[in-house]
C-alpha cells in the first residue's frame, strides 16, 4: 500500500488582532491508497482548518507556518498557485460542509460538474463530459435528466448527491468529505454515507471523512484520528479506537454518544468546553477537563507516541486509563 | 412569463394615469396659472376674454380639463407648446429626446462599466492600498456638488488647456452650409449604436450556442464586435455625415466625462459590497477547490452572482437617460430634455412641461418592467 497523502507536523495558524490562533498545531497522519480515514473532534478543534490546508484554500489571515503535506510524494505546501490548481479536484477533491450552498445558484447543476471536468481535461469535448456526468448521476443515485435543473430545484438530499457526483468528476485519488451529511436527516444521512463508502471501495479511492459525530465516522472509516484543540490526540484503526480507547478525551467522546446495540447506559458528557485556540497553553490542552490529570499534565505537553503497533496517543497516562476503563466497564 | 408581462402592462397603465394626474394638478397648482397668463392683457375686451377661455376649454372645471387632457394624451396628442408656438410638443420632444438619449446612454454605459469592473476588482483584492484610494476618491466624486465639478472641468479642459469645446452640442460654423438638421445626425448616431449593440448581443447568443469553451466564445464575441464597429466607423467615414457626427461626438466628450465621474462610484460601491457578500459564499470556495483559475472564479462565479443588485441600479438610472441631468444639460448648454423641462417649467409652458414629464414617466415605468424581465434571465431562482 502506497501513501496517497502524508501530513507531517502540519502547523497552520490564523493571525488575529488578539494573537495567533493555532488551529492546526503539529498534525501528522498518513492516508494510504484505497484507505478511508475519519477525523473526529468537537466544533472548533481545527478539523476544517486541516482540510482547508490540504486543499490550500486558506483564509487571508491563515498561514501554514510549518510542516509538510505530501500528496503522492510531492510537497504541496510549496507549490505555486497554478500548480496547485492542477492538483485541486483532479488529485484531491472535496465534499463541503454545507453541500446545500456549495452549488452556484445561477448555473445548472450539470454544467457546474462539466466545468470541473473541462477545466482539468481540456481534450474532453462537451458531449463526452455530459455523458460522464450522466454516468456519475447514475452512480450516486440521481436521475441523469435532472442535470439541466438549477440547484434550487433539487431537494437537500439530491444536492448532497450532486455534490458527491461532482467530487468524483475528475477521478481524484483522494476525497475529503467535510461533514458531508450534517445538514441531512438521519435516514438520508445513513443512506448517503453507505453509498459513498461503497463508491469509495468500488473505485479504490482514498477518503478522509471529517465529522464531529464519532458514530457516523465509525460506520465508514477504517482508521480514526481524534482531534482536540488543534492536535491529534489519538490515532488508530477503528476497532482499536472503539475497543481500547487510550486517551481520556476519546473515552469521553465514546460515552457521550448513545449506542443502539449494547446495554442502556447513562450518557456521560465531558465537563467544560473546548479550549480557546488563541494563545494555547504549553501543557496538555485537555488537562483542564481531564479527570486523570496529574501535576505532570499541567507542566508540559505529552508526546505523541506509538503505544502499541499503529496506535498513537498523546497522553501521559494511557496505560492507567485502560485499567480504569476495564475496572469501571 | 407572458401572463406576468400582461399583468405588469396593466399596472403600468394604471400608474401612468395616476402619474399624469399628479403632473397635471401639480402644474396647475403653480401660482399664476394659464387663465391669468392668457388674459393678463388689459386691452382685451370681456368678449375676447370669454372667447379665449372658451377656445382653450378653460371655462370648464379643472376636472373636465383633466379628463380632456388624459384623452388627448392617450390619443397621442400632447398639444402645442406655448413658448415655441405653434410647434406641437411632439416635434419638440422628437427633436430633443435623441440628444439626451445619446448623451446619457453613453455616459451611463461608461460609468456602469467603470464602476462594475473596478468594484469587482476592489472586492477581489481586498485590503490593498488601491481599495482605500479608490473608495475615498469614489465617495468624493459621488458626493461632490455637481455644478462645481462641471465648472472645474469646463475651466480646466475648455479654458485653461483649451482643448475642449466649452458649450453647445455642435460647432455652428461647421453646420452653416449644411442642408440637413442635427436631428438627422443624432438619429443616425443612435441607430448606429443600436445596430452595433444588437450585433454584439447576437454574437453573444451565437457564441453561447456554438461553443462551450470560454476561449472560443470570447473569440467569436470579440471578432463580431470588432467587425460591426469597424463597419460602423467605415460607414460614417465615407458618408457625407461623417464630419458632423464627429463634431457632435467631440462636443459630447466633456459632458460624458462629467456624468461618468459623478456617477461611476455609485455602481462601484454597490458592486463592491455585493461582491464582498458573494465571496463569502460556499460556492466560491467550491469553485476554488475545483481548481478553476482565479479569474474564472472571480468573473464566472463571483461577479455573475454579485451583479444582480448592480443591474437594478443600472436600469433604474436609465430614468436619468430621458429626463437628462437638468444641471448637466444647463451648464453644458446641451439643449436636451433636461433643459427643455427646466425652461418649460420656468416659462409656464404647460403642454411642453407635462409632455416632457410624461415621457420620462413612461420610460421609467418601462425600465422597471425591463429590470424584472432581465432578472428572470439572470437569476434562475426568479420565475414569474
Image (spheres, helix red, strand yellow):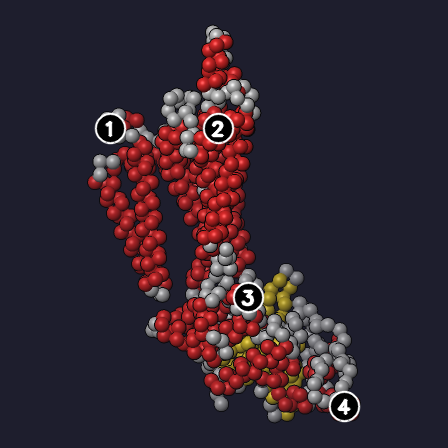
Q: Are marks 4 and 3 in contact (CB under 8 Å)?
A: no
Which residue is depicted at the point 42% across and 33% down? B75
Horizontal side of A233 relative to B128 (left or right) equals right
Can you tell which of label 1 and label 3 is closer to the viewer? 1
Can you tell which of label 4 and label 2 is closer to the viewer? 2
Q: Position of residue A162 (x, y in %)?
A: 50, 73
The answer for how far apart the CA atoms under marks 2 and 1 are is 39 Å
Disc 3 secondary structure class: helix
Which residue is depicted at the point 65% across and 87% down? A241
Q: Which mark is residue A177?
A: none
Disc 4 secondary structure class: loop
* Residue bearing the label numbered 3: A101
Mark 2 chain: B
* Residue bearing the label numbered 4: A329
Chain-order first, disc 2 or disc 1: 2
Q: Position of residue B244 (x, y in %)?
A: 27, 34
The answer for how far apart the CA atoms under marks 1 and 3 are is 64 Å
Q: Position of residue B351 (x, y in %)?
A: 45, 26
The answer for how far apart the CA atoms under marks 4 and 1 are is 107 Å
Amino acid at each position: 500500500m502506497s501513501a496517497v497523502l502524508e501530513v507531517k507536523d502540519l502547523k497552520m495558524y490564523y493571525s488575529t488582532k488578539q494573537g495567533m490562533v493555532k488551529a492546526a498545531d503539529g498534525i501528522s497522519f498518513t492516508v494510504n491508497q484505497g484507505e478511508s480515514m475519519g477525523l473526529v473532534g468537537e466544533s472548533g478543534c481545527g478539523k476544517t482548518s486541516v482540510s482547508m490546508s490540504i486543499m490550500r484554500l486558506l483564509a487571508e489571515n491563515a498561514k501554514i507556518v510549518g510542516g509538510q503535506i505530501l500528496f503522492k510524494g510531492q510537497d504541496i505546501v510549496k507549490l505555486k498557485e497554478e500548480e496547485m490548481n492542477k492538483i485541486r479536484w483532479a488529485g484531491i477533491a472535496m465534499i463541503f460542509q454545507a453541500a446545500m450552498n456549495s452549488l452556484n445558484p445561477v448555473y445548472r447543476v450539470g454544467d457546474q460538474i462539466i466545468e470541473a471536468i473541462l477545466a482539468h481535461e481540456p481534450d474532453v469535448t462537451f458531449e463526452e463530459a455530459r455523458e460522464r456526468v450522466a454516468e456519475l448521476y447514475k452512480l450516486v443515485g440521481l436521475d441523469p435528466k435532472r442535470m439541466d435543473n438549477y440547484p434550487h430545484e433539487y431537494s437537500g438530499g439530491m444536492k448532497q448527491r450532486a455534490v458527491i457526483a461532482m467530487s468524483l468528476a475528475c477521478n481524484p485519488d483522494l476525497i475529503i468529505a467535510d461533514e458531508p451529511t450534517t445538514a441531512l436527516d438521519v435516514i438520508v444521512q445513513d443512506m448517503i454515507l453507505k453509498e459513498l463508502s461503497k463508491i469509495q471501495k468500488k473505485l479504490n479511492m482514498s477518503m478522509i471523512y471529517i465529522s464531529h459525530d464519532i458514530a457516523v465516522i465509525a460506520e465508514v472509516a477504517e482508521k480514526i484520528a481524534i482531534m482536540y484543540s488543534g492536535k491529534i490526540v489519538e490515532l488508530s484503526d477503528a476497532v482499536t479506537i472503539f475497543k481500547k480507547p487510550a486517551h481520556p478525551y476519546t473515552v469521553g467522546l465514546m460515552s457521550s454518544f448513545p449506542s443502539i446495540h449494547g446495554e442502556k447506559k447513562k450518557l456521560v458528557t465531558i465537563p467544560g468546553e473546548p479550549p480557546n485556540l488563541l494563545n494555547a497553553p504549553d501543557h496538555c490542552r485537555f488537562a483542564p477537563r481531564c479527570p486523570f490529570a496529574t501535576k505532570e499534565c499541567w507542566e508540559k505537553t505529552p508526546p505523541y507516541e506509538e503505544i502499541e503497533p499503529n496506535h498513537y496517543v498523546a497522553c501521559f497516562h494511557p496505560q492507567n486509563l485502560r485499567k480504569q476503563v476495564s475496572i469501571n466497564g | 412569463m407572458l401572463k406576468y408581462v400582461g399583468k405588469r402592462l396593466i399596472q403600468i397603465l394604471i400608474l401612468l394615469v395616476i402619474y399624469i394626474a399628479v403632473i397635471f394638478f401639480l402644474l396647475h397648482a403653480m401660482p399664476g396659472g394659464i387663465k391669468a397668463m392668457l388674459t393678463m392683457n388689459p386691452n382685451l375686451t370681456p368678449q375676447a376674454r370669454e372667447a379665449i377661455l372658451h377656445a382653450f376649454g378653460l371655462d370648464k372645471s379643472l376636472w373636465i380639463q383633466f379628463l380632456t387632457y388624459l384623452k388627448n394624451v392617450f390619443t397621442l396628442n400632447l398639444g402645442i407648446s406655448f413658448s415655441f408656438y405653434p410647434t406641437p410638443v411632439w416635434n419638440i420632444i422628437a427633436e430633443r429626446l435623441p440628444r439626451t438619449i445619446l448623451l446619457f446612454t453613453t455616459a451611463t454605459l461608461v460609468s456602469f462599466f467603470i464602476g462594475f469592473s473596478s468594484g469587482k476588482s476592489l472586492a477581489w483584492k481586498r485590503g490593498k492600498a488601491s481599495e482605500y484610494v479608490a473608495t475615498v476618491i469614489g465617495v468624493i466624486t459621488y458626493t461632490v456638488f455637481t455644478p462645481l465639478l462641471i465648472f472645474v472641468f469646463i475651466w480646466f479642459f475648455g479654458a485653461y488647456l483649451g482643448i475642449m469645446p466649452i458649450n453647445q452640442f455642435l460647432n455652428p460654423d461647421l453646420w452653416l452650409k449644411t442642408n440637413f438638421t442635427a436631428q438627422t445626425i443624432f438619429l443616425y448616431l443612435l441607430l448606429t449604436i443600436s445596430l452595433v449593440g444588437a450585433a454584439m448581443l447576437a454574437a453573444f447568443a451565437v457564441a453561447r450556442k456554438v461553443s462551450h469553451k470560454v476561449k472560443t466564445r470570447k473569440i467569436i464575441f470579440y471578432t463580431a464586435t470588432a467587425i460591426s464597429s469597424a463597419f460602423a466607423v467605415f460607414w460614417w467615414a465615407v458618408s457625407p455625415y461623417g464630419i458632423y457626427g464627429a463634431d457632435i461626438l467631440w462636443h459630447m466628450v466633456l459632458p460624458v466625462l462629467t456624468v461618468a465621474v459623478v456617477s461611476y462610484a455609485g455602481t462601484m460601491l454597490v458592486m463592491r459590497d455585493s461582491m464582498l457578500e458573494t465571496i463569502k459564499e460556499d460556492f466560491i470556495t467550491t469553485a476554488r477547490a475545483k481548481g478553476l483559475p482565479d479569474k474564472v472564479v472571480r468573473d464566472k462565479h463571483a461577479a455573475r452572482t454579485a451583479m444582480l443588485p448592480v443591474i437594478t441600479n443600472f436600469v433604474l438610472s436609465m430614468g436619468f437617460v430621458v429626463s437628462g441631468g437638468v444641471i448637466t444639460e444647463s451648464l453644458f448648454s446641451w439643449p436636451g430634455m433636461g433643459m427643455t423641462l427646466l425652461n418649460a417649467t420656468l416659462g409656464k409652458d404647460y403642454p411642453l412641461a407635462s409632455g416632457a414629464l410624461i415621457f420620462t414617466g413612461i420610460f421609467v415605468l418601462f425600465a422597471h418592467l425591463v429590470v424584472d424581465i432581465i432578472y428572470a434571465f439572470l437569476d434562475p431562482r426568479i420565475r414569474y
